[in-house]
Image (tube, helix red, strand yellow):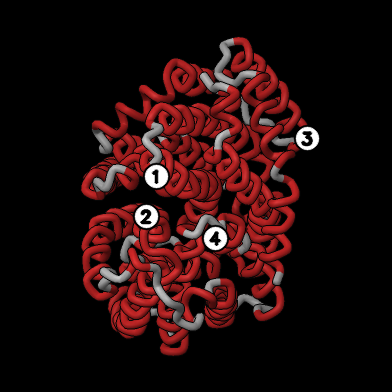
């Protein structure tokens, strides 16, 4: 349970700023997600959209080979470097790591050309070239945004993920007047170039700023050795992140391979998009809390760190339960309404995919703990466990086509969460009975899995009623308390001016 001192601490102030920044950018993410699924599949059609989903899966898998664990490196170590070495240390760290990223981006762009040709013979040379360009630009862009995360600039960092679908939807409408895979891939490449430019501009002070005199305590800094040590730390996280992306992005490829249908691939990709929307939201929250938990550990305040982790687990579990009910409620009316009549079969796939939301709070708490505790192998083993579960389940459920593979993804996320082992136990313990109640309470939405209203207003009304029952139960069980909510809102109000300044800086 929280205390007044806890809520007024520097950690509470930082948490409020991070939560505000993520919430602010969620407006763009929600708008982008709705507009994308409403406009892009309809414009491309089931065939071309399925091809794009396949090509995008390849792009994502290959670009993640160049991720190198930078989010974990910057979020965990930059607060320490900034504290001990000052701005000189931050610049040395940033420039050393970015030089590695530039080489990785160029190399992976070339690898993409060969991999795409081998993986899909139906891709034309211009399409393969655009895929290689997208991979190179994306690998470049990951670095500056990870740096912003470590600097505590959550508003700017979260732009990288929350604004992407809104931007790419606009580019698709502008650059793709007719169904064309080549034009769609060109829009993806332009999007990557835009985000690279934004990230470099926001991080320019640390990447290109003039060197300054280092404080006495920074004289022992050895940038090359520091870069090498941190890359070794990030390597295990990078492999784990790659395994997770492989899990998510190999699944459309597996649907394509097992069914031979571009349409089934399209159905699956739309369901996966709904899952990844909430998965990405929790990712932003988790990574935003890594610097905060690190600072609390450095300040010898483990009880406050545990309290904040418990809040993340409890409230994430509530959010995932609401998301599960929402996906079940609207799947039948939304699939043909937003995507087009040809996508109506996607509703069953969406329902199966939604089950994967429930393990995510424990999984992302495990990510936080493995990063703060400097135990990258925990995340690696968890990711590999999830990948193995997916492959076995996908083969067993392949007769269910896209819906069967969607259930395999949900089972894989459960395996991923349990794969954190001791960290999963700690996460469950810090979440306490509140986390268990929030997760078990999702049973209130089970009728929506079997009863499938065809009317969207009716579906939303029923979901809203059940959500009200669920939230009332959470308040009665004290999973969420009015005093805790008021305290957090009080911090947000006190930091309102600072948040407004952050937003103004982000617009520059």
Crowd class of label 4 (few under 14; some 14 to 19; many from 20; radius 10 Å): many
The quadrant of the image that shows the C terminus is bottom right
Indicate the quadrant where residue 340 lies: bottom right
Q: Is residue 177 above or below residue 163?
A: below
Mark 2 or mark 1, which has the lower sequence index?
Answer: 2
Indicate the quadrant where residue 36 lies: bottom right
Mark 3 or mark 1, which has the lower sequence index?
Answer: 1
The reply to whether dot 2 and dot 1 touch (C-beta < 8 Å) is yes
Q: Is residue 43 above or below residue 27?
A: below
| Residue at 69 percent of width and 51 percent of height | 499
Q: How many marks?
A: 4
Query: Mark 2 or mark 3: which is in front?
Result: 2
| Residue at 54 percent of width and 22 percent of height | 2
The reply to whether dot 3 and dot 4 touch (C-beta < 8 Å) is no
Residue 457 marker: 3
The reply to whether dot 4 and dot 2 touch (C-beta < 8 Å) is no
Crowd class of label 1 (few under 14; some 14 to 19; many from 20; radius 10 Å): many
The answer for how far apart the CA atoms under marks 4 and 2 are is 19 Å
Q: Which residue is mark 1?
A: 294
The answer for how far apart the CA atoms under marks 2 and 1 are is 9 Å
| Residue at 53 percent of width and 42 percent of height | 350
The answer for how far apart the CA atoms under marks 2 and 3 are is 51 Å
The answer for how far apart the CA atoms under marks 3 and 4 are is 36 Å
Crowd class of label 2 (few under 14; some 14 to 19; many from 20; radius 10 Å): some
Q: Which residue is mark 4?
A: 157
Residue 311 marker: none
Q: Which residue is mark 2?
A: 80
Mark 3 or mark 4, which has the lower sequence index?
Answer: 4
């Amino acid at each position: 349970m929280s205390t007044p001192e806890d809520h007024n601490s520097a950690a509470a102030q930082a948490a409020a700023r991070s939560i505000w920044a993520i919430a602010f950018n969620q407006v763009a993410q929600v708008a982008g997600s709705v507009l994308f699924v409403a406009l892009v599949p309809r414009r491309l059609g089931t065939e071309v959209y399925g091809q794009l989903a396949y090509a995008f899966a390849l792009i994502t898998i290959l670009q993640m080979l160049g991720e190198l664990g930078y989010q974990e490196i910057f979020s965990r170590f930059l607060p320490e470097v900034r504290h001990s070495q000052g701005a000189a240390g931050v610049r040395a760290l940033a420039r050393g790591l970015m030089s590695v990223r530039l080489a990785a981006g160029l190399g992976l762009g070339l690898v993409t050309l060969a991999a795409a040709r081998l993986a899909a013979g139906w891709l034309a040379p211009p399409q393969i070239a655009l895929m290689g360009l997208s991979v190179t630009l994306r690998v470049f862009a990951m670095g500056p945004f990870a740096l912003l995360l470590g600097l505590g600039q959550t508003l700017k960092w979260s732009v990288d993920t929350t604004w992407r679908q809104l931007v790419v939807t606009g580019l698709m409408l502008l650059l793709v007047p007719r169904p064309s895979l080549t034009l769609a891939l060109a829009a993806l490449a332009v999007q990557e170039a835009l985000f690279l430019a934004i990230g470099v501009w926001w991080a320019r002070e640390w990447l290109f700023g003039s060197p300054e005199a280092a404080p006495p305590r920074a004289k022992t800094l050895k940038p090359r050795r520091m870069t090498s040590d941190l890359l070794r730390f990030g390597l295990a996280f990078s492999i784990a992140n790659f395994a997770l992306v492989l899990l998510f992005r190999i699944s459309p490829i597996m649907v394509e391979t097992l069914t031979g249908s571009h349409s089934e691939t399209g159905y699956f990709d739309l369901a996966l998009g709904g899952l990844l929307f909430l998965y990405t939201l929790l990712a932003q929250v988790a990574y935003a809390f890594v610097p905060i938990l690190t600072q609390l550990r450095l300040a010898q305040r483990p009880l406050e760190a545990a309290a904040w982790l418990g809040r993340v687990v409890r409230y994430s579990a509530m959010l995932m339960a609401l998301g599960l009910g929402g996906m079940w409620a609207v799947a039948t009316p939304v699939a043909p309404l937003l995507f087009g009549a040809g996508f109506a079969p996607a509703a069953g796939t969406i329902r199966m995919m939604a089950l994967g939301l429930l393990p995510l709070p424990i999984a992302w708490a495990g990510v936080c703990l493995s990063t703060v505790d400097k135990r990258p192998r925990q995340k690696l083993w968890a990711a590999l466990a999830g990948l193995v579960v997916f492959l076995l389940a996908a083969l067993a459920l392949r007769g269910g086509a896209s819906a069967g593979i969607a259930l395999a993804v949900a089972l894989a996320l459960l395996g991923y969460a349990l794969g954190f082992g001791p960290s999963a136990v700690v996460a469950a313990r810090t979440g306490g009975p509140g986390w268990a109640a929030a997760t078990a309470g999702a049973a209130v939405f089970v009728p929506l899995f079997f009863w499938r209203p065809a009317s969207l207003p009716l579906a939303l009304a029923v979901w809203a009623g059940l959500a009200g029952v669920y939230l009332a139960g959470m308040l009665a069980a004290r999973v969420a308390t009015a005093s805790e909510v008021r305290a957090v809102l009080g911090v947000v109000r006190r930091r309102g001016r600072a948040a407004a300044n952050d937003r103004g800086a982000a617009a520059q």
